[in-house]
Image (cartoon, helix red, strand yellow):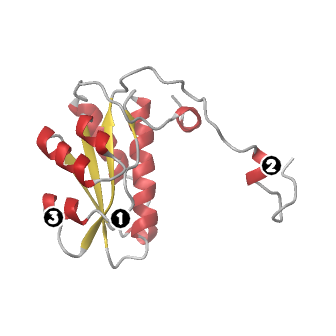
């Protein structure tokens, strides 16, 4: 699918089939993260691919908003350099690129956490100069989901032309 179609249709997936994601798809997802644009090309990130079921279960217990990580085929733990002011924005872009790439292959995902994942850092041996920004579980959706059916505010509520509050239309 093209980029706009992926953006238009992607939805959060929190229930996964017990089906592995093929290695070539996993590599495409990770490659999408690695190739993401980065401020001053500093690439202040590191990605840990987790596929071991016990580790996924532990991550699911550690992330208050993501117990369903335990049921995913894999998760990518995204760590950023603590002292890099571009870390959050650069890694966020990489997360979105991974999610869209996965969606193109029929693999669902969702963003779990936003910092506060020190236990995950310890579990995965992430060095002290880095912190876990998020955990992204991936897997095939357990049920067909309505691609593109989103509840979004109307365009004119979130977009202005030239000055805030001026109609976009």
For marks 3 and 1, give the CA distance.
14 Å
Asked if marks 3 and 1 touch (Cβ < 8 Å), the reply is: no
Q: CA distance from mark 2 to mark 3?
A: 45 Å
Q: Residue furthest top?
A: 144
Q: Does residue 10 appear to the left or right of 24 in the view shown? A: right
Of labels 3 and 1, earlier in sequence is 1
Q: CA gap, disc 2 to disc 1? A: 32 Å
Q: Is residue 14 above or below residue 121?
A: above
The mark closer to the camera, 2 or 1, is 1
Q: Which residue is pictured at 57% across the width and 32% down the height?
A: 5
Give the SS element for disc 2. helix
Do the residues under discs 2 and 1 have CB atoms within 8 angstroms?
no
For the point 77% across and 51% down, the residue is 157
Q: Residue at x 75, y 43 (%)?
A: 154
Point 28% across, 42% down: residue: 69
Q: Dot 3, how many residues are within 10 Å of its Cα: few (below 14), some (14-19), or many (20+)?
A: few
Instruction: From the image, tell me which residue sits under label 3.
Output: 122
Crowding around mark 2 (Cα neighbors within 10 Å: few <14, some 14 to 19, many 20+) is: few
**Looking at the image, is 34 positioned above or below residue 23?**
below
**What residue sits right under mark 2 in the picture?**
156
Residue corresponding to mark 1: 115
* Residue 108: image location, x then y, percent: 39, 33
Mark 2 vs 3, N-terminal side:
3
């Amino acid at each position: 699918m093209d980029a706009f179609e992926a953006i238009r249709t992607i939805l959060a997936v929190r229930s996964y089939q017990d089906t592995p994601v093929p290695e070539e798809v996993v590599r495409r997802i990770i490659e999408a993260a690695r190739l993401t644009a980065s401020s001053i090309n500093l690439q202040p990130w590191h990605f840990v691919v987790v596929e071991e079921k016990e580790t996924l279960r532990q991550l699911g217990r550690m992330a208050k908003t993501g117990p369903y990580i335990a049921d995913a085929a894999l998760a990518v733990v995204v760590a950023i350099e603590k002292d890099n002011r571009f870390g959050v924005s650069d890694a966020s872009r990489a997360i979105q690129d991974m999610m869209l790439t996965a969606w193109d292959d029929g693999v669902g995902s969702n963003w779990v956490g936003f910092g506060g994942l020190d236990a995950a850092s310890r579990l995965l041996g992430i060095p002290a100069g880095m912190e876990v920004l998020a955990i992204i579980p991936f897997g095939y959706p357990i049920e067909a989901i309505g691609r593109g059916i989103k509840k979004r505010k109307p365009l004119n509520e979130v977009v202005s032309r030239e000055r805030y509050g001026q109609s976009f239309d």
